[in-house]
Image (spheres, grey):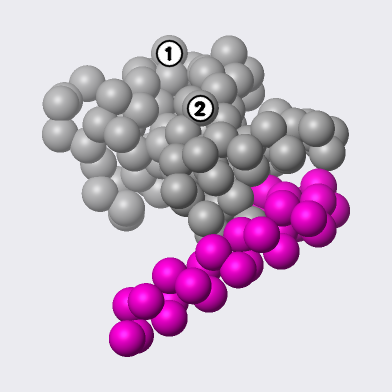
């Protein structure tokens, strides 16, 4: 496979029209993952039900506090996570000052105490920027 990643149209052709082997689709997923294009990698891994790589991305999302990536990878894994897990990823996002992600995670876990705390922080930051 070429080191040049396919553009959107080529990617769609590879995923849904061409009849690439599982090995080839995993290789494309790996190439996208290596390039930091997680959402594209998920599409390739999802196509071949490569749960090992999807779990790896899930772990990366948890570690980086990336709630949107975390949610996206839960879909092909067909997983639902506990409030404790949402609180953990929310705490990680909060520690990394990713307040929008943290807010979303705490709202998913119905942790109103942390959600309100983050809303106050976000409002304060917005006021500071507008001053």
In which quadrant of the rendered view does residue 39 lie?
top left
**With respect to residue 127, does 12 lie above or below?**
above
Q: As rendered, which of 110 and 29 lies closer to the eye?
A: 110
Query: Residue 129, percent across and down?
Result: 33, 77
In which quadrant of the rendered view does residue 84 lie?
top right
Give the labeled residue for mark 2. Answer: 63
Is 118 within the magenta?
yes
Query: Residue 107, percent across and down?
Result: 75, 57
Give the labeled residue for mark 1. Answer: 23
128 relative to 22 in the view: left or right: left
Secondary structure of the residue carrying tag 2 is helix
Instruction: Specify start and end residues of the magenta stretch as a single range.
Output: 104-131
Q: As rendered, which of 73 and 20 lies closer to the eye?
A: 73
**With respect to residue 123, does 69 lie above or below?**
above
Query: Residue 111, percent across and down?
Result: 81, 51
Marks 1,2: beta carbons within 8 A: no
The C terminus - image quarter: bottom left
77 relative to 32 in the view: left or right: right
Q: Distance between the residues labelled 1 and 2?
A: 28 Å
Secondary structure of the residue carrying tag 1 is helix
Residue drawn 54% across and 64% down? 121
* Disc number lying in front (1 or 2): 2
User: Can residue 109 be spotted in the picture?
Assistant: yes
């Amino acid at each position: 496979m070429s080191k040049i990643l396919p553009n959107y149209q080529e990617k769609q052709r590879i995923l849904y029209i061409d009849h690439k082997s599982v090995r080839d689709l995993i290789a494309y997923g790996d190439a996208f993952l290596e390039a930091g294009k997680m959402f594209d990698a998920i599409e390739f891994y999802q196509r071949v039900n490569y749960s090992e790589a999807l779990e790896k991305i899930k772990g990366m999302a948890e570690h980086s506090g990336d709630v949107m990536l975390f949610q996206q990878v839960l879909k092909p894994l067909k997983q639902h996570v506990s409030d404790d897990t949402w609180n953990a990823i929310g705490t990680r996002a909060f520690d990394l000052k990713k307040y929008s992600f943290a807010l979303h995670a705490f709202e998913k876990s119905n942790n109103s105490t942390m959600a309100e705390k983050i809303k106050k922080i976000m409002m304060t930051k917005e006021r500071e920027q507008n001053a």
